[in-house]
Image (cartoon, grey):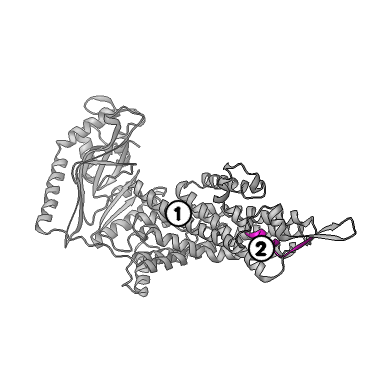
Amino acid sequence: MAAQVNLDVPTCLVKEPVISHDNPISYKSDRIRGIFLTWKDLWVTVPEKAMAVVEGRRPILAGVTGYAEPGEAYVTQDDTLMTTLTVREVVHYSAQLQLPDSMSKPDKRKRAEQTINEMGLQDAIDTRIGGWSVKGLSSGQKRRVSICIEILTRPKLLFLDEPTSGLDSAASYHVMSRIIKLARQDKRTVVVSIHQPSGEVFELFHNLCLLSSGKMVYFGSASAANEFFASNGFRCPSMRNPSDHYLRTINKDFDADIEQGFHGMITATEAIDFLAKLYTSSGANRQVQQRLHHIMDLKNREPLEIMKEKHAGLTTQCLVLTRRSFVNMYRDLGYYWLRLAIYIAVCVCVGTIFHNIGYSYSSIQARGSMLMFVAAFLTFMAIGGFPSFVEEMKIFSRERLNGHYGVAPFVVGNTLSSIPYLLLISVVPGLIAYYLVGLQKSFDHFAYFALLLFACMMLVESLMMIVASIVPNFLMGIITGAGLQGMMMLCGGLFRLPNDLPVPFWRYPMYYIAFHKYANEGFYKNEFEGLKFEEGVGCGGMSRSISGDEILRSVWQVEMGYSKWIDVSILFGMLAFYRIMFFAIIKCVEKIKL
């Protein structure tokens, strides 16, 4: 997009920005008017590989100057909300996270409902946000919910990224009129960017900033922009939206010629350079410079004392995020309920195929195959919840960017909220398969079986969380996670026995890194230890039997130097390591982005 219409202040989202000049952006305030935002001679460049530019970088902003005042607005897009929650729940949970612990719960609830009413959402307060599984709010209502979340703390300086994107003209006007009303009544400085505003929305603007290829084409009163363009030969035709005319004039994406009243047809590039040059010597630019000096003088008379915003404490954040995530998992069919249904169906199949296998010599292979299937396939299916987790990661990224809470509460909340569901899908399907097959019938053996299955599922979910933090695309993430698990299965001890694995890489270190080794060992020890298998009738007519311990050593090549409880302890240790790794990766990614 070569041209963009902004309200009050230009912004851009770029990768690896470099801002030149010392402190080009400053914040000022006074007690009556609130917070002013000013920027002078601001340059922003980004790395550029394709185009030949100075020192391999391309300017996005080139010497931009302007300001935003309290009570005025500036117009920039994304509604990342938890689709299973209602409007009341979304805003109330956010209030509990953002508002300090010194504020009582009734006061937080009152603030949340007051904010909902301010954005005109009281009629939809108990309506779910809506997603693929359930119909919910309209696009305009979702946009207003997003705004509700960010104005809960009554910020004096508010940035909005394209609040009308994807909305029709009526919804756009309703959203923008609400924003401007809040800006006026609370004396807030609102910074927003907008694309292609309708005529009604454009009339709401106080100041207008026009940028093209980083150059300032115009900054000043929105009502005076028409006169500026007309006096320089670019008169807006009657019955045309002024914002459409301005964008068409300064947009060089299509390299179309533009009619200029003084020189005939000229290129878009020539028109941009012409207007930018005229603006620097125009009365509008002089007014901007005078206003900047006036705002800067406020600092000398009354310096701003910046106070750090207080949020909820760590314990409160962990509890709120756990509760919110638990509710989301309960209502999202794709998170655990669909998996539970499939697990039950698969375990019924396992139970009927391996039904009552007995204790004959031939049951040794059947037992091993059944246990390996449980350890491999049932845990492998845990990647099915990856798309839902990616959506939760997107919500975390937005809320983390706005400082609602830290990384640690998110990791703790997600871990605690998933435990009941993973226990459920470990116990119920496991119970069906375990007793239909006829494994050891004592309760302590089944309890260990379910605990080991739970640990494996938690491990796979932790692995997929790590993948999601690196590969946020859900399709690529599922492929990556499936590939990693496939490699671990191969060296887990069934498809290729441990002593037969190639020593470099596969035996050391992959065999000991893969959690399937400890899962298989735990399942095998839990089932085979203490059993006797009838091998058949010998030459003397005597029946011969073989012990389960011998099977573990000679057939499955299980390490017998430690108990099955060591195996499950190792799995829980790996679980903790994976969660810590997930935490560390998020922190590293944040630092890289900064």
Q: In percent of the image, x 13 and y 58: which residue is there?
A: 303
- Give the total of numbered labels: 2
Of residue 110 and residue 375, the one placed in the foreground of this image is 375
User: Where is residue 395 drawn, in percent x and y?
Assistant: 43, 55
Which numbered disc, 1 or 2, marks the residue closer to the eye?
Answer: 2
Q: From this viewpoint, which residue is outermost toward the left?
A: 301
Left or right, 471 with respect to 422, comes to: left
Q: What residue type is labelled 2?
A: Asn
User: Where is residue 42 drawn, in percent x and y?
Assistant: 21, 41
Of residue 353 and residue 553, the one placed in the foreground of this image is 553
Q: What element carries label 2?
A: helix
Look at the image and say whether residue 583 sits in the magenta stretch: no
Q: What residue type is labelled 1?
A: Phe
Q: Is residue 239 visible?
A: no
Rounded to the nearest angstrom, the CA distance separating label 1 from label 2 is: 31 Å
Magenta region, residue range? 522-533
Query: Residue tagged by mark 2?
Result: 526
Q: In percent of the image, x 55 and y 66: which residue is there?
A: 420
Query: Residue tagged by mark 1?
Result: 582
Q: In percent of the image, x 67 and y 54: which residue is there?
A: 372
Q: In percent of the image, x 37 and y 66: which residue is there?
A: 314
User: Where is residue 486 drawn, in percent x and y?
Assistant: 60, 46
Q: How crowded is mark 1: few (under 14 residues within 10 Å), some or many (20 or more)?
A: many
Picture quarter with the N terminus = top left
Q: In the rendered structure, find residue 54 and report the number of the disc placed on it.
A: none
Q: Can residue 312 be seen in this view?
A: yes
Of residue 141 and residue 317, the one placed in the foreground of this image is 317
